[in-house]
Amino acid sequence: MFRTRITELLGIEHPIISAPMAGIATANLVAAVSAAGGFGLIGGTTPGGADWLREQIRAVRERTDRPFGVGFISSFPGLDELVAVALEEKVAAISHSFADPTTYIPAAHAAGVKVLVQVQTVAQAVVAVNAGADAIAAQGTEAGGHTGYSGTMAIVPTVVDVAKGVPVIAAGGIADGRGLAAALMLGAEGAWIGTRFVASVEAVRPQWQKDRIVEASADDTVVTRAYDLAANAAFPDYIIDRVLRNDFTDVWAGRDADVAARRDELGPEVARATQENNQAIAPVRAGNASGMVHAVEPAGDILRRIVREAELILRERVKAVLRSED
């Protein structure tokens, strides 16, 4: 069994956090991850608003008494009301992404709630440390959905170097025990996993999207801002969106100015395609780790297998590659 500063900070058995994917990480997924010994995060930034979030928090508590939290896309409007709900409900932790978290940390700490901050650059990590973050998720560009440009192998140890003792969680491209073991060897205290949990029974996604992740290889993703520009989504300019390739990305990826100019046409087209499950146009946000996903399975089984694999690797691989001097 692992014991890291993240397991101690969050009161969990295994150093795995499920990403707070908006519209995907709802009560069923979060409860399954937490009940299995990890830390589930509700995707708190959803059209349902404050009432929906409160219902989701209480639904998790009906399913498990294990710790869990809520994560936010902190660049989106209406955040204050959502954060207030999470603090009122006394979740174990909240997470912030895509914005300076400084103004949100004092109130969370006053409520006894830990704050995790996801960063895409070393400079953002320094801001989070100085703001008093309890842990930092260093996200590499391999991550599915909204991400930055630095690779996981580079950003994790460099964030560890500037974290001043604040625990770091590795995010981006982790889907099995090899990834968790590698993250721990880079100096991280745990892994933040998204794509692998999208292809879980409990994730709120159409079956065709889960199947596409299972079928995809590591070569089948593309980074683009086309979907965000079409929807006029409130993500910072430095954030890109990793999705599975389709006809829409083949036409519009890399044509940011053209997409913005045709937003009135393309935005409704994408929204309609998503409702109608049009695979040629609707986005499937997934990372390079898709190439390691081979089946849609219960989230608890996924988590337990990742832990078993990582434990075996860390016990046996070191013996295989290190030779004692004669």
Image (spheres, grey):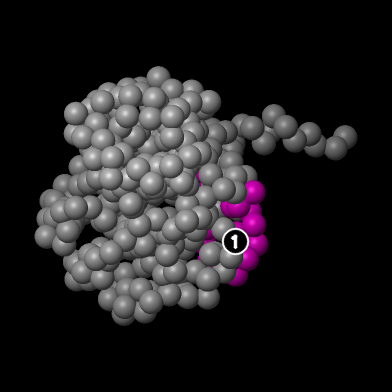
Q: Which residue is more in the foreground, 132 or 225? A: 225
Q: Which residue is mark 1?
A: 122
- Left or right: where 24 falls relative to 321: left
Question: With 150 as the anchor, is 280 left or right in this view?
Answer: left
Percent of width and height locating residue 124: 53, 64
Residue 242 in percent (x, y) is at 45, 39
Quarter of the image for the C terminus: give it. top right
Q: In this picture, which residue range is highlighted in magenta?
A: 154-172
Q: Using the rendered image of the protein, determine whether residue 132 is visible from the camera's viewpoint.
A: yes
Q: Position of residue 89 (x, y in %)?
A: 19, 66
Of the pair 188 and 81, the residue shown nearer to us: 81
In percent of the image, x 64 and y 49: which residue is there?
Answer: 154
Kindly identify the residue that appears in the image at 46 percent across and 46 percent down: 257
| Residue at figure coordinates x 31%, y 61% from the top left | 76
Residue type, numbered disc 1 = Val
Q: What residue appears at the point 36 percent right and 62 percent down from the top-left corner? A: 75
Image label count: 1
Number of other residues with Cα within 10 Å of mark 1, as a class: few under 14, some 14 to 19, many 20 or more: many
